Image (cartoon, helix red, strand yellow):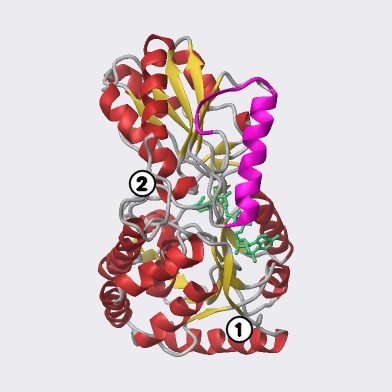
Amino acid sequence: MAIATINPTTGETEQEFEPHTAEEVERRIARAQDAFAALKDTTFARRAEWLRRAADLLDAEVDSTARMLVVEMGKPIAQAEAEVRKSAKGLRFYADHAEGFLADEPLADPAAVGAAKAWTRYEPLGPVLAVMPWNFPIWQALRFAAPALAAGNTGLLKHASNVPRTALYLDALFARAGFPEGAFQALLVGSDAVNAVIEDPRVKAVTLTGSEPAGRSVAAAAGAAIKKTVLELGGSDPFVVLPSADLDAAVETAVKARTINNGQSCIASKRFIVHADVYDEFARRFAEATAALVVGDPLDPGTDVGPLATESGRDDLAELVDDAVAKGAEVLAGGGAPDRAGWFYTPTVLAGLSEDARIVQEEAFGPVAALYRAEDAEEAVRIANQTPFGLSSSVWTTDAEEQARFVRRLDAGAVFVNGMTVSFPELPFGGVKNSGYGRELAAAGIREFTNLKTVWQG
Ligand code: NAP
């Protein structure tokens, strides 16, 4: 895949980039190693100061950075601005909390292990490789970078090949904020260069956010090299609506949860599982609201849904819909690509899916909703859990017992009750099943890439 900025709104190539040579990658790994030697002995307070400065730069540059995101991957401008601000918030969160999250933990009763004193401490590992996707090009990269740097690790970012401007912006950001040269660097390389970096003994761990095949490949290479991985992969999150739900809120949130970021979010609700008692009304109102969305230029503040980020992504999505329709699905809204330049796909609602439709098992990475009718809560749980994914989930009910049952029984890394899934720096984020393993954000996220060292003192 060429490393290039191709504007998805027009389909035109704005800029192509020479990939880094193997020698340049080598230089960058060496620099990451040298920077680690300096960074690991800095104080939390010093690293927090640099993280806050990086956050201030993001806030000061929100307009130009947001426009860069829109040109590279097509999200609506207001959402791009929100992403930049949220990323600044994530940097400040770890500036404020890293020291507490990684504080030494003394054993309350050292005599039980025959020690005068025993405790655990968290130590940074060294250079960590992050393989990142294009859908939240700043936020995804920073939710790795903020905890990694706060802990004293250094970062190597292999960003998606269609967001090189963002990769280079991030490459410069941390040096501008005061971090030692080499603390955080981009590797402008294709996915075929990733394994060699994983195998390099100076690189201590790897995190990947992306598709299932990419996750399998990276985990296999890291496994062979005995290196820790965190994998944040795809999802096909259920959005379950039960009879006691506030239907106005559920419909409004369902539309947003499916179409935010032009439908390209791992934690977007993708399957809408509605109890038979409220199915007809929900389906009608959901389809009407989806059809009313404004599809257009993402730089226009009036646009709800912009183009898909890549041509192949748009084509994959169209194939999933065509497959479902060929197998008998009913199209309640949308159902095709509009006749215009760029990689647009009209927001779509499908119902009456046959069991063998690919969309029943596969992730639809774009504004296409799959609607399911469940005869009772038990069937809703079964449908919710029937995919190979387990990232997040959303359940709408005001019945306390039902809420507790769904929280317990949904096979997912998160359950949001009467709300859509959102990532927050304060809450751990990650999946089960084929959605991956390990956690990002909160205390769990910063501890992933540390050595939990046990100290026993006689
Ligand atoms: P993708 O093709 O897997 O790309 C993601 C990153 O992995 C890119 O940097 C890509 O590089 C790299 N990559 C691809 N194949 C690789 C391989 N065999 N070895 C090493 N690196 C490889 O994913 P995408 O289709 O662009 O992104 C959408 C997917 O990401 C969806 O499935 C979505 O659900 C998932 N996602 C998950 C989360 C989460 O937190 N769980 C968040 C966002 C997105 P190139 O660009 O050079 O190919």
- Relative to 214, 286 lies left or right: left
Give how far across and how far down residue 435 sits, in percent. 57, 44
Mark 2 — residue?
A: 422
Tell me where the magenta segment starts and ends, as one range. 310-334
| Residue type indicated by callout 1 | Ile
From the image, give the main secondary structure of the stretch colored magenta: helix
The residue closer to the viewer here, 397 or 373, is: 373
Tell which tag, 2 or 1, sits nearer the viewer: 2
Mark 1 — residue?
A: 29
The residue closer to the viewer here, 106 or 340, is: 340
Lower position in the chain sequence, tag 2 or tag 1 = 1
Q: Quadrant of residue 224?
A: bottom right
Q: Secondary structure at mark 2?
A: loop
Q: Is residue 9 visible?
A: yes
Label drawn at residue 233:
none
Give how far across and how far down residue 191 sits, in percent. 68, 67
Q: Is residue 454 visible?
A: no
Tag count: 2
- Relative to 288, 439 lies left or right: right
Identify the residue at horizontal 42%, vertical 48% (top origin). 305
